[in-house]
Image (cartoon, rainbow, N blue to C red):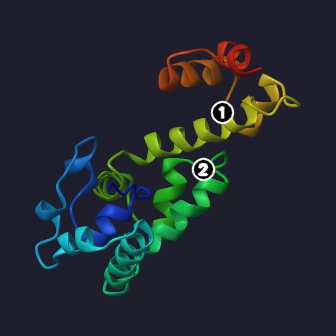
Amino acid sequence: MGVRLKPGSFYFLFNIAADKIMDNEISFTEIEKEYELFDILKLETQDQRISYLTNYLLKKINTRRKMPFVDFVEQLYKNPKDQTVTQLAQKFGYNKRHLYRIFKTNYGVSPKVLLNILRLHLCLTLILDKNVTLIEIANTCGFYDQAHFIKTIKKYTGISPIKILKSYG
């Protein structure tokens, strides 16, 4: 059984920096010393296990303090286009360097990389929508020009937007 968490959730729940565990498989016993989750293996059905795990996570969430930037990052998912690292730092009330440290700890990546990933996600969603041109996608996702758009897509996916269109068109 495995659990995939949204970015920022792992640090919120277990207080272990995301950049320390990113792209690693970690045994639950290494992270959670206070709770014996092996009881889940004694349960008979998948539904019982899911319920047990859900209850554990809800208890864990309720014991943590609210982290204001978690909600803010959720808003970035909805509109990554008009955001810059400078704007993010101003909204949080931090300088850019401190914001960088916070994002590395919580999300495992810098604010700039997170914004690029969110823009890429929006781009890929729009590319698969057959009614939108690449130029419209570049503008919608906040890229300065078509070359910047193509370079960023290639950097994160390894292929050009045209090839993506041909592959999924």
Q: Position of residue 26 (x, y in %)?
A: 19, 51
| Left-right relation of 29 to 151 | left
- Give, as a three-letter code, the residue at label 1: Leu
Q: Is residue 42 left or right of residue 91?
A: left
Q: Image quadrant for the N terminus? A: bottom left
Query: In this picture, is 20 found above or below 167?
Result: below
Q: What residue lies at 68% left-to-right and 16% top-to-bottom?
A: 167
Near mark 1 (Cα within 10 A), the count class, few <14, some 14-19 or many ≥20, is: some
How far across and how far down the image is residue 125, in percent?
70, 38
Q: On the image, numbered disc 2 is attached to which residue?
A: 83
- Quadrant (top left/top right/bottom left/bottom right) for the C terminus: top right
Q: Earlier in the sequence, mark 2 or mark 1?
A: 2
Residue at image mark 1: 124
Residue 53: quarter of image = bottom left
Q: Quadrant of residue 59?
A: bottom left
**Mark 1 secondary-structure assignment:** helix
* Circles 2 and 1: CB atoms closer than 8 Å: no
56 and 17: which is toward the camera: 56
